[in-house]
Image: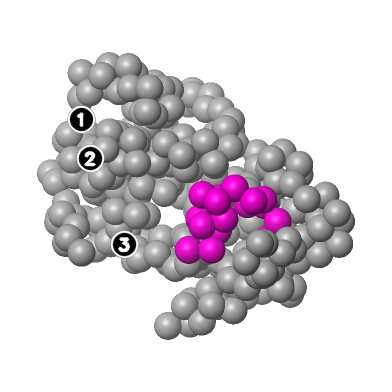
Amino acid sequence: MAKPPSLRALPRRDAAPRSTGKSVKEPERNFTLATSPAADAIAPTAQEASGLVVGTDGRARCWWPGDDPLYVRYHDEEWGRPVRNDHRLFEKICLEGFQSGLSWLTILRKREHFRESFEGFDPERVARMTSRNVAQLMKNTGIVRHKGKIESTINNAKRALELIEERGSLAKYFWGWEPPVKERPAVCSYEALKATSTTPASVRLSKELKARGWTFVGPTTIYAFMQAMGLVNDHIEGCHCRPEVARMRRR
């Protein structure tokens, strides 16, 4: 496997924007994978019971991927598994921002185009992108062509480099926000997951990131990021992935 590019911090070219008392309205995301309208439309009989769906492979899993092969593979092989690679963490927080107002499946189908367009989500390289790059990306039909989200990704790359310089890595920073056990549900059930689109930890982290100048990092976006990157294990009880993810988180 190729070694990822170095994540050494660049000199601070643009400081994080200071508050001027005027807030810029960003489209706030209000659902996670489990609370999305798309998840509501999948397997209602299973949802009414346990939230588990048995696939053609005979394994029980969370209901929200439905039977889409790409989504099922994402659920089984990626979602919730602990990630401590800075490039993947940066990629995910950016793509969660792009998802605002859309479904994650839409982003997942475009993910390789995003990776090509944003330099593999190497913060050093993304931070160097200019208005000319933004104009080019606005013509790229392989990604979500939202100027605000594209500019946000470039801004967040600069903020990520500041965090790397300060904390040593994004992994050290983000894993420092893993929520305490007392803030987690006693049982991760379908009902608990459907009722949760933010958590105290995601609200705290969102507030901290915004204070540091990050954008498109509302508390629901951050909770979805925490779920996907394994800072919490939100595979519901009975899902075949839950025990393995729990073991991975204990390592």
According to the picture, the residue beneath numbered tag 2 turns out to be: 119
Examine the rendering and report whether any part of residue 39 can be seen: yes
- Residue shown at the point (54%, 77%) measured from the top left: 244
Vertical arrangement, residue 42 with respect to residue 15, above or below: below
The amino acid at mark 2 is Glu
Residue 16 at x, y = what percent? 31, 37
Question: Where on the picture, by quarter, is residue 13?
Answer: top left
Mark 1 residue element: loop
- Residue shown at the point (36%, 47%) measured from the top left: 91
The amino acid at mark 3 is Asn
Give the residues drawn in magenta, as a range: 62-77
Mark 2–mark 3 distance (CA, rounded to whole Å)? 16 Å
Q: Nearer the viewer, residue 96 or 182?
A: 96
Residue 215 at x, y = what percent? 43, 36
Instruction: State which mark lies toward you, 1 or 2.
Output: 2
Q: Which mark is residue 85?
A: 3
Mark 2 residue element: helix
Disc 2 to disc 3: CB gap under 8 Å: no
Mark 1–mark 2 distance (CA, rounded to whole Å)? 10 Å
Q: Nearer the viewer, residue 69 or 125?
A: 69
Q: Nearer the viewer, residue 183 or 134?
A: 134
Disc nearer the start of the sequence (1/2): 2
- The C terminus lies in quadrant: bottom left
Question: Where on the picture, by quarter, is residue 88?
Answer: bottom left
Vertical arrangement, residue 13 with respect to residue 180, above or below: above
- Residue shown at the point (65%, 39%) measured from the top left: 30
According to the picture, the residue beneath numbered tag 1 turns out to be: 129
Disc 1 to disc 2: CB gap under 8 Å: yes
Total marks in image: 3
Mark 3–mark 1 distance (CA, rounded to whole Å)? 22 Å
Neighbourhood count class around disc 3 (C-alpha, 10 Å): few under 14, some 14–19, many 20 upward: few
